[in-house]
Image (cartoon, rainbow, N blue to C red):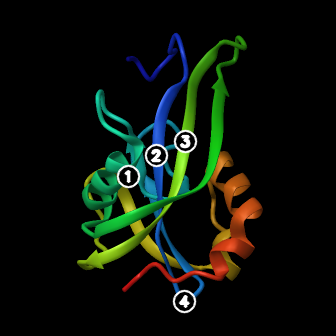
Amino acid sequence: MKRLYPDQPVVGVGAVIVRNESIILIKRANEPSKGKWTIPGGLVELAESPETAVIREAKEETGLEVYNPTLVDVVSNVDFDAAGKVKYHYVIIDYLVHVKSGNAVCSSDAAELRWVPFSEVESYNLTASFRLFFRKNREKLAKVNSYV
């Protein structure tokens, strides 16, 4: 399935990893939204469940072993080109995941990784879909600590 100018929406997952009212954010190294901040994640592969995908993506992008993905929200991200044609369309399933082991490190898919206090998140240059997700779910996330 092609990402650029797709024929249908592309399904992705996001890993919500929190600790003491901070969240792991990555700065995107690639399009779409290159240079913007969001949570770790990626595409669901053929024959892979979204839960398995979010565990795999969290490991690939942060080096963390995670478990127990719990659905938090589903968001849609549609980007149009100058002619009004759909350039990207993602449906992103966001899961709170719990950390089993590891130290958070930036992978090659990301330009940077940071623990960001909830109070500072909206000062970052966020992807539109993550900004919407965070505004909608901030209070719920503040009540959890997924990092062991």
- Name the amino acid, label 3: Ile
Q: Are marks 1 and 2 in contact (CB under 8 Å)?
A: yes
Q: Residue furthest bottom?
A: 20
Residue at numbered disc 3: 92
Per the image, the residue denoted by label 2 is: 13
At mark 3, the secondary structure is strand
Q: Quadrant of residue 91?
A: top right
Of the two numbered discs 4 and 1 on the same chain, state the one appearing first in sequence.
4
Q: Nearer the viewer, residue 29 or 75?
A: 75
Instruction: Determine whether 4 is above or below 94 in the image.
Output: above
State the CA–CA distance, disc 4 to disc 1: 22 Å
Label 2 – label 4 distance at C-alpha: 23 Å
Disc 4 to disc 3, C-alpha distance: 25 Å
Neighbours of disc 3 within 10 Å: few (<14), some (14-19), many (20+): many
Tag 2's secondary structure?
strand
Give yes or no for contact between labels 2 and 3 (Cβ–Cβ under 8 Å).
yes
Residue placed under numbered mark 4 in the picture = 20
Query: Mark 1 = which residue?
Result: 54
Residue 26: horizontal and vertical position, in percent? 45, 61
